[in-house]
């Protein structure tokens, strides 16, 4: 199903110029589109409609991935809860028949009851640059080695 109607020849050229694995557009796209016999406004409209179509598809895929992720989590939780139930029913005793072999293994893990009481020597400290603070410093005239403000341009399609 398509939300937008764009020229079939344009669609064919875009398909030829786009890597199906990565979505990268080849460098010769400009030449291919220039060879297309249609008005500039129509070419622009086709590109915009194609962009909107791809964004709509990406959003639909994200929505479906989220649904599948939730279903996966439910299935995993269901299986884990049934494992716990089975372990309880077996009283953590091994079980074996011709097809099934259930065993139990002891393991250890640390459960933190109150993180505030843990000494610093047992804490992991991560270090990451604060881009917000760096940007503010550079804008106020401070030179920050290893960082610079790069001006980007983005396109807005409405």
Image (spheres, rainbow, N blue to C red):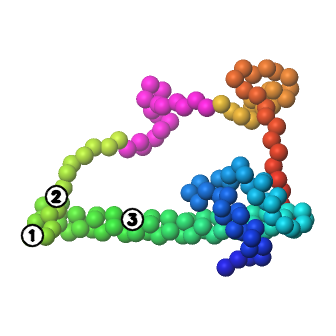
Measured as percent of width and height from the top left, residue 142 is found at: 81, 21
Q: Quadrant of the N terminus?
A: bottom right
* Residue 20 visible (yes or no): yes
Q: Quadrant of residue 32?
A: bottom right
Q: Are marks 3 and 2 in contact (CB under 8 Å)?
A: no
Name the N-terminal-most of marks 1 and 2.
1
Q: Secondary structure at mark 3?
A: helix
Magenta segment range? 111-128
Q: Give the label, 1 or 2, closer to the camera.
A: 1
Which residue is at a point 69% across and 33% down the rendered structure image? 130
Viewer-nearest residue: 143 or 18: 18
113 in the magenta segment: yes
Q: Nearer the viewer, residue 71 or 90?
A: 71
Q: Which numbered disc covers residue 103?
A: 2
Q: Is residue 146 above or below residue 16?
A: above
Pointer 1 with pointer 2, Cβ within 8 A: no
Residue 73 belongs to magenta span:
no
Q: Which residue is mark 1?
A: 97
Decide which of tag 3 and tag 2 comes sooner along the chain.
3
Task: Determine the CA span between mark 1 and mark 3.
Answer: 25 Å
Q: Quadrant of residue 13?
A: bottom right
Q: Position of residue 22 (x, y in %)?
A: 59, 54
* Residue at position x 74%, y 70% in the image: 9
Q: Position of residue 20 (x, y in %)?
A: 59, 60
Q: Which residue is mark 3?
A: 76
Please identify the dominant SS of the magenta region.
loop
């Amino acid at each position: 199903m398509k939300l937008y109607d764009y020229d079939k020849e344009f669609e064919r050229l875009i398909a030829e110029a786009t890597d199906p694995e990565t979505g990268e557009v080849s460098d010769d796209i400009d030449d291919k589109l220039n060879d297309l016999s249609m008005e500039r406004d129509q070419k622009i409209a086709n590109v915009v409609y194609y962009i909107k179509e791809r964004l709509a598809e990406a959003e639909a895929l994200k929505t479906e991935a989220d649904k599948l992720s939730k279903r996966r989590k439910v299935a995993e939780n269901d299986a884990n809860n049934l494992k716990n139930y089975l372990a309880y029913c077996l009283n953590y005793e091994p079980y074996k028949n011709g097809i099934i072999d259930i065993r139990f293994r002891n393991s250890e893990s640390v459960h933190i009851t109150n993180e505030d009481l843990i000494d610093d020597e047992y804490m992991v400290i991560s270090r990451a640059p604060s881009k917000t603070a760096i940007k503010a410093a550079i804008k106020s005239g401070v030179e920050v080695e290893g960082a610079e403000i790069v001006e980007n341009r983005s396109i807005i399609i409405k």
